[in-house]
């Protein structure tokens, strides 16, 4: 159900990389910018710490000047040093700016031509690191914390790459990928994904495929479907082998997994090689499962080409195949080594596939809340240019959730919003009546009815209808069969199914128990409404 249109619709290449960009680290106080600069120096870059230049210009420690002259005077002097520094900086250089530099409009403007890396840190972790320093704005916890919401939106707007700084070494781990980002087409952005089992780069932007950069060394083997392979397979060359499956959920079977694994063995794939999953969520799930099980695990690169995969399924390491009884009943956790989400591939999606994928965008925005929810509601067109920044923000939302709960023992359950009923509808209809996103859209409507969020449910119904997505369950699908599949939900515990409910966008609860009659009523309503 994730087929693409013909090769005549394949997008052209995006503008090439700009080799004259410096890497510039920004972030809140104590985010680890000096440590990141040291990692850049180890990588062979010429490095500059802006605060050191400013102190030399002031001929006095910054803390003393700040105390004597005040912040406004300091920002003027900072502008006089940092803007010329950024104007003359070029390739092969790395610069670390002070935490408040982004407050200066001229500095923000000068940053536009560089690769800006936001070292993202939690405010309490920043306070723990900064409280015993000589920073003039780190003497009172409440005043320190009050600065955070003022600056964070500016970091977010400026960032070409987001590197969460949960450990001081994170930027060093990410440095090879940041250097790789410099080789990718202009407009490509990066998120450094972190969770309990590992870390990996996520690249999002137009024209990534065929751009000459690849995140892993060694031989690469590819699993794709017959349509995506025709469109984009050649852009992954050189390949040591390529295996194709038929498009659609019907490929996610034990029999197909066995065929792929045996074919990889015939092709001579070794543990030092890696597998590339090129396609939508079906290929990503199937390829990921095979990567996890082949020779007890090989590295995996996810190359998602559908909106569902670019927004959701390519991240977080969940893999799976279906049984006739239920969806994704067999699977494993297997983090990718990298994700390359080329937003240009969305041009080749038929309108119906793009709209179905948009449901995962809607689900993520409901979980994230504002401002993402308002941005998604206002999307009238679903083209790659409009969707690329949304894809990036949705990926960030999912990765932040996964980082806090990789193995689905708590908060990660929120990502199941709408999926309990959605997956049941897919299984009850033999995976043939609805695309995944269409079924999840119906599941979201049911979840909001169970949440007693009637007004939000009405708004969602209007949004789905505006993109010609179904809001009514096909009467030929028995409600009893949908309920039976819900009863076999793989997340069901001894106390029953734990539901994800939404009070309002961004305010979400998981693990909620629901009486069977209320569930029946919510599913039946999907058939009853006109």
Image: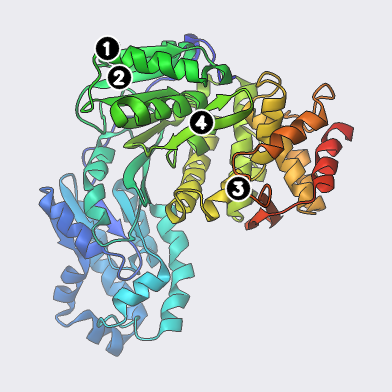
Q: Which residue is mark 3?
A: 365
Query: Which residue matches tag 1?
Result: 267
The residue wearing badge 2 is 221
Q: Is residue 159 above or below residue 335?
A: below
Q: In the image, residue 83 lies at what x, y percent?
A: 27, 60
Is disc 3 surrounded by few (<14), some (14 to 19) or many (20+) residues within 10 Å? many
Q: Which residue is mark 4?
A: 330
Query: Foreground mark, 1 or 3?
Result: 1
Q: Is residue 198 above or below residue 325?
A: below
Circle 4 Cα neighbour tier, 10 Å, few/some/many (<14 / 14–19 / ≥20):
some
* Secondary structure under the numbered disc 1 in the rendered image: helix
Q: Residue at x 11, y 52 (%)?
A: 42
**Callout 1: 10 Å neighbours few (<14), some, many (20+)?**
some
Coordinates of residue 178 in the picture (x, y in percent): 26, 44
Q: Earlier in the sequence, mark 1 or mark 2?
A: 2
Q: CA distance from mark 1 to mark 2?
A: 9 Å
Numbered badge on residue 70: none
């Amino acid at each position: 159900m994730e087929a693409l249109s013909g090769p005549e619709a394949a997008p052209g290449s995006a503008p090439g990389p700009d080799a004259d960009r410096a890497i510039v680290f920004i972030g809140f106080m104590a985010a680890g910018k000096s440590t990141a600069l040291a990692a850049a120096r180890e990588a062979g870059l010429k490095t500059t710490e802006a605060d050191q230049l400013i102190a030399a210009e002031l001929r006095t420690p910054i803390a003393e000047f700040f105390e004597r002259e005040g912040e406004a005077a300091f920002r003027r002097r900072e502008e006089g040093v940092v803007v010329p520094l950024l104007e003359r900086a070029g390739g092969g250089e790395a610069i670390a700016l002070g935490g408040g530099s982004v407050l200066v409009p001229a500095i923000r403007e000068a940053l536009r031509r560089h690769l800006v890396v936001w070292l993202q840190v939690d405010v309490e972790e920043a306070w723990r690191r900064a409280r015993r320093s000589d920073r003039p704005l780190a003497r009172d916890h409440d005043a320190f914390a009050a600065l955070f919401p003022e600056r964070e939106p500016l970091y977010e707007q400026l960032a070409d790459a987001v590197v969460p700084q949960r450990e001081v070494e994170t930027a060093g781990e990410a440095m090879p990928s940041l250097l790789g980002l410099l080789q990718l087409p202009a407009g490509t952005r990066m998120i450094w994904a972190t969770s309990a089992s590992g870390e990996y780069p996520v690249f999002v932007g137009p024209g990534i495929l065929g751009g000459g950069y690849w995140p892993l060394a060694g031989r690469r083997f590819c699993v794709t479907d017959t349509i995506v392979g025709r469109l984009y397979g050649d852009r992954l060359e050189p390949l040591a082998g390529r295996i194709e499956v038929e498009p659609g959920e019907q490929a996610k079977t034990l029999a197909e997994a066995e065929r792929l694994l045996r074919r990889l063995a015939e092709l001579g794939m070794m543990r030092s090689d890696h597998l590339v999953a090129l396609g939508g969520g079906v290929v990503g799930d199937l390829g990921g499962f095979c990567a996890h099980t082949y020779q007890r695990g090989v590295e995996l690169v996810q190359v998602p080409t559908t909106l569902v995969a670019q927004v959701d399924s390519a991240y977080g390491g969940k893999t799976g195949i279906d049984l006739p009884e239920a969806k994704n009943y067999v699977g494993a956790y297997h983090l990718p080594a990298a994700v390359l989400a080329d937003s240009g591939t969305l041009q080749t999606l038929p309108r119906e596939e793009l709209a179905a994928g948009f449901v995962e965008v809607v689900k993520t925005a409901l979980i994230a809340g504002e401002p993402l929810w308002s941005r998604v509601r206002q999307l009238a067109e679903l083209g790659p240019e409009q969707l690329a920044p949304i894809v990036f923000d949705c990926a960030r939302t999912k990765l932040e959730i996964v980082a806090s709960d990789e193995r689905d023992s708590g908060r990660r359950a929120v990502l199941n919003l709408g999926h309990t009923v959605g997956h049941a509808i897919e299984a009850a209809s033999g995976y043939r009546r609805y695309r995944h996103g269409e079924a999840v859209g119906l599941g979201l409507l049911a979840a909001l009815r169970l949440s007693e969020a009637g007004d939000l449910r009405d708004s969602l119904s209007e949004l789905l209808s505006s993109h010609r997505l179904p809001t009514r369950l096909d009467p030929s699908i028995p409600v009893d069969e949908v309920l039976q599949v819900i009863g076999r939900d793989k997340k069901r515990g001894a106390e029953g199914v734990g539901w994800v409910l939404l009070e309002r966008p961004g305010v979400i609860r998981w693990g909620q128990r629901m009486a069977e009659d209320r569930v029946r009523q919510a599913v039946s309503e999907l058939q009853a409404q006109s």
